[in-house]
Amino acid sequence: MTCVKICGLRRKEDIDYVNLYKPQFAGFVFAESRRKVSKETARMLVKALLPQIKSVGIFVNEKKETVAEIVKYTGLDCVQLHGDETPEYVEKLKELLGRITEKRIEIWKAVRVKNKESLEIISEFDVDAFLLDAYVEGSYGGAGAVFDWQLAADVAAGHERIILAGGLNPENVKTAVAKVKPYGVDVSSGVETDGFKDAEKIRDFIMKVREADGGVLS
C-alpha cells in the first residue's frame, strides 16, 4: 500500500481532517513558509493526532541542536531535511537524536530533482527515506511544481523508500502512483483551497491513491 503524507498542517481542523481520513504521515513545517508553525502549536497538533499517524517535521538548513530540541519538545516521529544538509550533518543529527530521545526518529532527505544527475547524491546518504521534489530556483519546496516522473520511477525501482512530491493533487496522483510505484506520496498545496487544507480534497487524494493501489478508501 502506498503511504500518504499530508504536509503543512497548522490548524486544529487540519488534524480533524487527517484523523478522519487517516494518511500514514502528517507534516509540520518549521522552515520559513506561510505554513510554518511554532513548536508550541506543533506540540499541540501532534498530540491531537491519532496514534497510528506518524508526525513529520520539515526543516531547511536548521542547526542540528534546534532540530533535536524541537523533536524532543513536540514528540515528532520523523525529521524531513529539505535543504542543503550534508551526509555528515545527517550522521551527527542521528547521534544527537539518539542521545536525547527514547524512541528512534526516522530521518528523510529531500532531493530537488532538476535532472538525472541531481539524483546521484542519493547514494551518499544513509537515511530512512528520500523525498523527491521538483527543483524550483529560489525555493526549497512547497512550490507545487511537477517534475519528470520517469526519473522518479527509475529511482523507485531500485530503492525501497522513495516518497514522491511536487505538484501532486487529486487529479494526477493516481497516474503518478501507477507510473512511479513509490513507497509514498506527499501533498500540501494540492489539497488546499484558498491556502488552507480542504477536507474533501484530502479525501479525494487518498481515495485516488487507494484506487491506484487497487483498493478503496476505508
Image: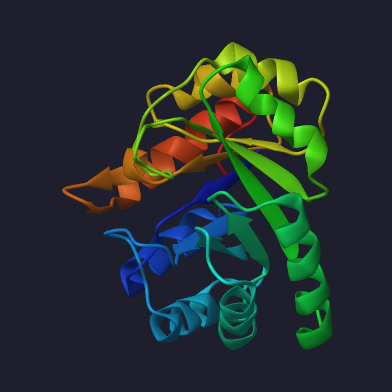
Task: Look at 56% across and 52% down and name the residue there.
Answer: 23
Q: How is the image coloured?
A: rainbow
Residue appearing at x 61%, y 12% in the figure: 150
Query: Hey, which quadrant is residue 115 in on the image?
Result: top right
Residue 108's place in the image compared with 191, above or below, is below
Q: Position of residue 18 (x, y in %)?
A: 47, 59
Q: Nearer the viewer, residue 76 or 215?
A: 76
Picture quadrant of residue 101: bottom right
Q: Position of residue 198 (x, y in %)?
A: 29, 50
Looking at the figure, which quarter contains the C terminus?
top right
Q: Residue at x 44, y 67 (%)?
A: 30
Residue under the point 37% across and 28% down: 145
Tally of numbered discs: 0
Image position of 191 (left or right of 2):
left
Residue 204 vertical position relative to residue 51 in the rendered view, above or below:
above
Is residue 171 shown above or below 10?
above
Height in image: 35 above or below 207? below
Q: x and y percent of residue 182 in the render?
A: 68, 29
Quarter placement of the N terminus: top right
Q: Is residue 9 left or right of residue 217?
A: left
